[in-house]
Amino acid sequence: MLLSIESSCDDSSIAITEIKTKKLLFHKKISQELEHSVYGGVVPELASRLHAQALPKILQSCNEYLPHIKAIAVTNEPGLSVTLVEGVTMAKALSLSLHVPLMGVNHLKGHIYSLFIEKEVQFPLTVLLVSGGHTQVIEVESLEKMCTVASTMDDSFGESFDKVAKMMQLAYPGGPVIEKLAKGANRLRYNFTVPLLQNKKIAFSYSGLKNAVRLAVEAGNEEDYPDIAASFEHIATKHLTYKLNKYFQNHPPKRFAIVGGASANLYLRAEIEKLLTPYKVQLLLAPLQYCSDNAAMIGRVALEMYDKRLFTPIDALHVSPRCDL
Ligand code: KG4
Ligand code: ZN
């Protein structure tokens, strides 16, 4: 069995995966949403302290598996350095005490493999990764051959939902809150500009849209919030589908997937499905419980790495907060 740990942001999670069957035997996650909610976003130092409490608690509840563990996997990049360090320190301690090797796992790869928990992988694959830290299009050929072909120039898709929710003094994370508020409201009432419409680059930007929403929030009152949320969600999504459509003209997808915390957004899912109709390609989605950060997806990458004996020596396992794929 493999034991995997995730602590790159505000979720503490541990999973146990069976090597032979790829089965997820244990998975537990403690989220810190409530604790960060009062601040309208993640406070790194607080997150770090909460991981230090939560990870040992989760580990205690899977004690029975420890004699069967053959390797420890841990997210070591990218993420918040002070929270990544909590998981990495625990992973190193476990590796030393159980005498098993370590694997440093890239969090973005984790999101991609969230599609294949208890399933065989399906590559090649074009992926839209939308989370709190990332908005990127990735061409995936294999575990070791992944290439980012487009990314955001400023805020990420999920982060823009968080910031809009904060402007309206709503809870963190903003994604589910804004999605709920937008449901049934008028998406066309506020004519926000689609970002980078005239720009030929396949890239994303959410800071301009965020500022336009801020002006609408300041000019309106609480009764306008549902329409503002709906119009924002509409334009934020249109920006993605417009740029993807442009990209597909030269790079038609063979298979397409949306991953990351914000891939739970149903309006986004529906709009991407519409976009894919003429290409007749399959849309892969992770089960809702594996869209946001979790250790099961890290364990799924670890199964592939274990197969290839891609271990990381203990003194070479560092955290890389800003690393890409
Ligand atoms: O993948 P994730 O759990 O953490 C990172 O790796 O960043 O993604 C969290 C992000 C947050 O910004 C959250 O607001 C966003 O995903 N999110 C959503 C939805 N659910 C979560 N954004 C839009 N619509 C949603 N339903
Ligand atoms: Zn994530």
Image: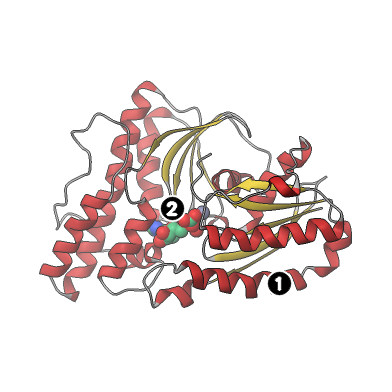
The structure residue drawn at horizontal position 52% and vertical position 51%, both measured from the top left corner, is 321
Q: Nearer the viewer, residue 78 or 204?
A: 78
The structure residue drawn at horizontal position 21% and vertical position 69%, both measured from the top left corner, is 225
- Dividing the image into four quarters, tell me where ligand 1 lies: bottom left
Labels 1 and 2: the sequence-earlier one: 1
Q: Quadrant of residue 59?
A: bottom right
Amino acid carrying label 2: it is: Gly
On the image, the x and y values in percent for residue 110 come to 59, 47
Tell me the number on the disc at residue 56. Answer: 1
Q: Residue furthest top?
A: 250
Circles 1 and 2, Cβ within 8 Å, touching? The answer is no
On the image, the x and y values in percent for residue 30 come to 60, 70
Looking at the rendered structure, the secondary structure element under dot 1 is: helix
Q: Is residue 21 above or below residue 90?
A: above
Q: Nearer the viewer, residue 174 or 102?
A: 102
Q: Is mark 2 within 8 Å of ligand 1?
A: yes
Q: Residue furthest front?
A: 315
